[in-house]
Amino acid sequence: MVATIVASLATSLLASSFSHSYHSTSSLFFTKLRSSSGLRFSLAVAPLCSRRAKFMAHTLARATLGLTQPANIEHPKISFAAKEIDVGEWKGDILAVGVTEKDMTKDENSKFQNSILKKLDGLLGGLLAEATSEEDFTGKAGQSTVLRLPGLGSKRVGLIGLGQSASSPAAFRGLGEAVAATARAAQASSVAVVLASSEGLSNESKLNTASAITSGTVLGIYEDNRYKSESKKPQLKSVDILGLGTGPELEKKLNYAENVSSAIIFGRELVNSPANVLTPVVLAEEASKIASLYSDVLSANILTAEQCKELKMGSYLGVAAASSNPPRFIHLCYKPPSGPIKAKLALVGKGLTFDSGGYNIKTGPGCSIEIMKIDMGGSAAVLGSAKALGQIKPPGVEVHFIVASCENMISGTGMRPRDIVTASNGKTIEVNNTDAEGRLTLADALVYACNQGVEKIVDLATLTGACIVALGPSIAGVFTPSDDLAKEVFEASEVSGEKFWRMPLEESYWESMKSGVADMVNTGARTGGAITAALFLKQFVDEKVQWMHIDMAGPVWNDKKHVATGFGISTLVEWVLKNSS
C-alpha cells in the first residue's frame, strides 16, 4: 500500500513540472541508529529527483515570481571638493550653514555674535537675523530654513540646526543628509556646506567631519527607485565643503567617504530587494560580481548544496532543505595587491533571503513575517564591506567574507521540530524551534571561517527579537569574550557613528540550551534570548580565534521610511583598516 502511494505521488509530481529536487541535501536526513541488540540501521526518505525538475527550477528562478526585475538605475554622481573661499563670494544654488544653538545667540540689538553668521547677515542687510527671528529658528537639531535673499553669490542661504553642540560623526552625517534634502526640495545642482563654528576643530576632526558630511549627502540624496514605475532624478551635481581645509589628505578622505557610501547603498539595495528577486542564487551572483569588479584583490568561491554536503554542513543544509530555491554558500577573499599579510580576519553574515519560520511559522501580531526579506541584512553588511575594501585596497590584511545563504520555508522535505542536525564540527543540534534557523546556518559558516586560518571573526546577524526588546531599533548588541576585540570594534564605531552596546555572555544561561538526546537544542528559555543565541554560536568557534557576534536585528531596517539602513558596513570597513595599519 505504501509503495503504491509513493509511486502514485512520484508520477503526479513528475507530471506537474513543480517537483522539488533535494538530492544534494538528502543525506542530512539519514539518521543512523543503534538498537538495544547492537543492530545498526538507517531511516531515510529518498528524494524525488529529475532533470526536468532541475530545469524547471532554474527557469522559474530566472523568471521570478511576479515577473519583477529591478530597473537598472544609475546612481547620481556628485562631485565633492574641499575649498577655502569666502562664504559671501561662493557662487552656486545653496549655501548651507550648519549652526548650533550657541551659534544662533544674538546681542541686545538682535545681531548675530557668531562671526560667519554676522558676516552673512551684514551682506544681506540684516535680513538673515530678521528672518530667523520671525521663523523662530534657534538651531535645534532637525530645524532648517532656506531663504532666497539678494546680496550673496549664492541664490539661497540655508541654515541647518545641529542642536546644542555638534562633535560626533552622526551629527555631521545628519548635516549632510539635511543638505541633501534641502537640495532635493529646491532642485539645486550646486551646494556649499560650511560650519558656523569650526575654529576649535583639530586637523583629524576636520577630516572626519568632512568625511561624515560627504557620506550623509551621498546617502541622503539616494533613493531606491528600482522597483517604481516612475521616479525623479535628483539634480545635485556638486558639493563644496568650505572652511575645513584643503589638500591631498582631505581629498583622500572625501574619496574614502564616497567609496564607503557607495558600498552602503549596495547593502541597502540588497536588503530592500524582495525575496522573489533576491534568491540565494542571485545573492551569490551579486557577490561574484563584486569579486569580478575588483579581481585584482578579491576572489570568489561559491559552493553548491552538493559541495556543502561534502563539507558535512548538516546544520546549514537542514534549514535550506524546504525551499525550491537552492542554497549557495558564499566565500569571497580579499588579499592586498602587494606586501606581507599581518592580520587574517573573517566577516560572517547571516544570509536568509526569506524566513517564514519554517514549521514554527511566524504568526500573530509582531511576528514581522512581512519584512522577513531583511533576514539577510548581515550578509548585506559583509558583502557591502567587501565592495568598499575592493575599492580602498588596504595593505597588510587578508579578509574572508562568508555567507551561508538560503531560505527558511515549509514543505514536505523541510526540517521539523525535534529533528536532529549535525554541524560540520560534528556537534549535534536538536531543533526545538525551526524559526531559530539563522544560528543553524551561522554554525557551519563559523566553522568554515575558523578553517580558513583567521585570527579574528566578526559575525553579523538579524538574529533575535529579544535584542530589539533590549536595545530598541537603532542599537546593535555586541557579544564577545574578547575585551581586545570589543575595544577595536567600538573604536571603529566611534568613527562610523553607528551605535553598538556590549551585552553579557552569561555562561550559566547555557543550562537552558541542553538537550536530552543531542549536544544542544537551538533555542533556550524565553528570557535572555539574545544571550543564549550568542552562546549557541560560541560552540562553533575555535577557542584560539577572537570572535564577536553582532545582533543587528534592530538597526538593519528604518521602520518609519520602510527601507534598509545599510547598517554595519562603515564600522566593519573602519575595523579592517585599523587591523591593516
Image (cartoon, grey):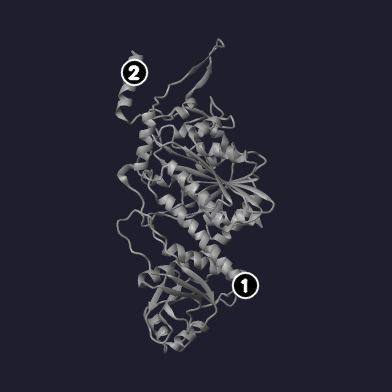
Q: Height in image: 568 above or below 155?
A: above
Query: Residue 536 appears in which quarter of the rendering?
Result: top right
Say the numbered circle drawn on residue 202. Answer: 1
**Residue named by callout 2:** 7
Tell which of 364 and 245 is nearer to you: 245
> Three-letter amino acid code at disc 1?
Ser
Tell which of 559 and 1 is nearer to you: 1
> Three-letter amino acid code at disc 2?
Ala
Q: Nearer the viewer, mark 1 or mark 2?
A: 2
* Residue 464 percent coordinates (x, y): 47, 44
Q: Secondary structure at mark 1?
A: loop
* Residue 55 percent coordinates (x, y): 37, 33
Q: Residues within 10 Å of mark 1 (few under 14, many from 20)?
A: few
Q: Residue at x 31, y 19 (%)?
A: 8
| Residue 110 visible in the snapshot | no
Say the numbered circle drawn on residue 539. Answer: none
* Residue 191 percent coordinates (x, y): 44, 74
Query: Residue 545 appears in which quarter of the rendering?
Result: top right
Label 1 – label 2 distance at C-alpha: 77 Å
Query: Residue 508 appears in which quarter of the rendering?
Result: top right
